[in-house]
Image (spheres, rainbow, N blue to C red):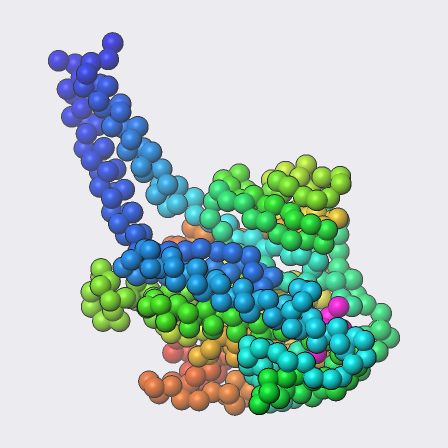
Amino acid sequence: MKPKPVLIYILPIVIVILLFSIWYFKRRAATVTDSRLMLGTFVEITAMGESRDELERAVESAFLRISEIEAVADRYTKNSEISKLNLMAKRGGVGEIPVSDDIIEMLDLAGEVSERSNGAFDVTIAPVVDLWDFSPGGRGVGGRVPDKGKIGERLRLVDYRSVVIEKDNNTVSLRKAGIKLDLGGIAKGYAVDEAVKVLRKLGVESGVINAGGDMAVIGYKGGYKGGHKGGGNNGGTPWRIGIQDPRNPNGLIAVLSLNDVSVVTSGDYERYFIKGGKRYHHIVDPKTGYPSEAAISVTVIAKNTALADTLATAIFVLGPEMGIRLAEDFAGKTDDGGNSVEAMIVGPDGKFYETGGFKDIVEYLD
Amino acid sequence: MFTRADKILIVVLIVISALSYPAIRHLFLGGTFVTIEVSGKERRVVRIGLDREVTVKGKIGDSIIRFDRKGVRFVDSPCEDRSCIEAGYIKDEGEVLRCEANDVTVRIIGVDDKGTKEKGIDFITR
């Protein structure tokens, strides 16, 4: 009978493929990943657990929370609270506007980082940033360097001290007409933190939220009650987060092994253009109105993403020496004796600068 | 012609191939890192899976960007000349697509997902 030899050779292959498929889908059954365009970036949420249905509900709720924050904090959304404040200031008003707890919390933290960094981070930088066009240039399109005089004029409107928060009655007032707020340096981080709270509340013990590089890791990878690996950390392993090489889009300079922490990187390679051989990027120094040249890349690890987000910008503007001091100034002690804030800076000279505990969690690559 | 055993074998192979396709595709094709910018204002970096479309609100309307095995391309745009759609796919690192009228820029910044997986990296901070 002819078909028999064929079956003898092919059946084992068929069985192997079938077993592989079963293993693969079983392995992935408890991982839910979704990504959406929000807050001007792609937000990707990954959650691991036992029940796919529960994970999907949790991820959906987390996205809903992020959209709530976007609705109040995005200055490009017409009726957001920030837009209302900016409109009032544009019309010359300096009165009070009632705002949500989210705006109060963001402005409160932003104000603290501004104060302690001596204005290296400033949510009122928008009038200057709006003069720049950091488009990378596609087919024949480049960026724009604004007129020096214009930058000087707009710098007069940059002053974080002009933003007054009244926590008791949830209002914000602006002391200077023409001021313009931009929460772009904190809103993504804050939204990630809020999404983490939602996921945790809904029982997610293992996951990652990544909002365009502003990232929080929950627990350990694959570490949840009933996790299939067994052992400590609920059976999981630390999340391995690569830090991009600032001068090689395909390369990494280091790998971090992390759990229950946030990590944010700011670099001069994200949005930039080159004119006359000079690189102009999107991290503008609030003192000069020009892109900071004090660093190439800054990575901050902190217990919450909003803090890591703001510190990454402030440290980038300050440069290695003062930047490391600022990170250490914000660092408290964690339960395991480590620092609650760690930072690594790639300086303008290409050298690495880091806080004391950074070396314990990093693996530098050749 | 085909015996009964041959026919059963063919059906079994087709079913198993169909079942295995998504897993094999995911394992061997990986993802693509791209940035999308609107009006040059916001950073947009994403590792995105294959075979999906993303709608982006630009200056004059919605641009639809498609990601699939061939690369990334605009499939719909509110612009009049539609040159962004005619530009077709980009797939290599450093390539850029831009819709001038809607002020939307798509740039591939890395496709080294395989190398990343080899190093055991879960995510990249950039």
Viewed as shown, does residue B1 lie left or right of A365? left
Question: Which residue is at a point 84% across and 78% down the rendered structure image?
Answer: A153
Q: Residue at x 63, y 38 (%)?
A: B88
Between residues B38 and A238, which one lies in front from this camera angle?
B38
**Residue A137: x and y, percent?**
71, 54
Q: Quadrant of residue A222?
A: bottom left
A200 left or right of B96? left
Seen from this angle, which residue lies furthest left?
A1
What's drawn in magenta, residue-wise? A124-130
Q: Is residue A126 left or right of residue A330?
A: right
Q: Is residue A114 above or below residue A154?
A: below
Residue B42 percent across, percent down from the top left: 64, 63
Say above or below: A80 vs B4: below
The residue closer to the viewer here, A127 or A174, is A174
Identify the residue at horizontal 38%, vertical 74% (top origin): A260
- Give the quarter of the figure containing the C terminus of chain A: bottom left
Q: Is residue A138 visible in this depiction of the protein?
A: no
Res. A92 image quadrant: bottom right
Q: Is residue A275 above or below residue A315?
A: above
Q: Residue at x 27, y 59 (%)?
A: A50
Q: Position of residue A236 (x, y in %)?
A: 28, 66
Q: Is residue A153 magenta?
A: no
User: In the image as oriented, which residue stretches furthest toward the right?
Assistant: A149
Circle count? 0
Q: Is residue A7 visible?
A: yes
Residue A125 on the magenta segment? yes
Q: Quadrant of the N terminus of chain A?
A: top left
Residue A26 pos. (x, y %): 26, 49
Q: Is residue A195 above or below residue A138?
A: below
Left or right, residue A51 beside residue A47 = left
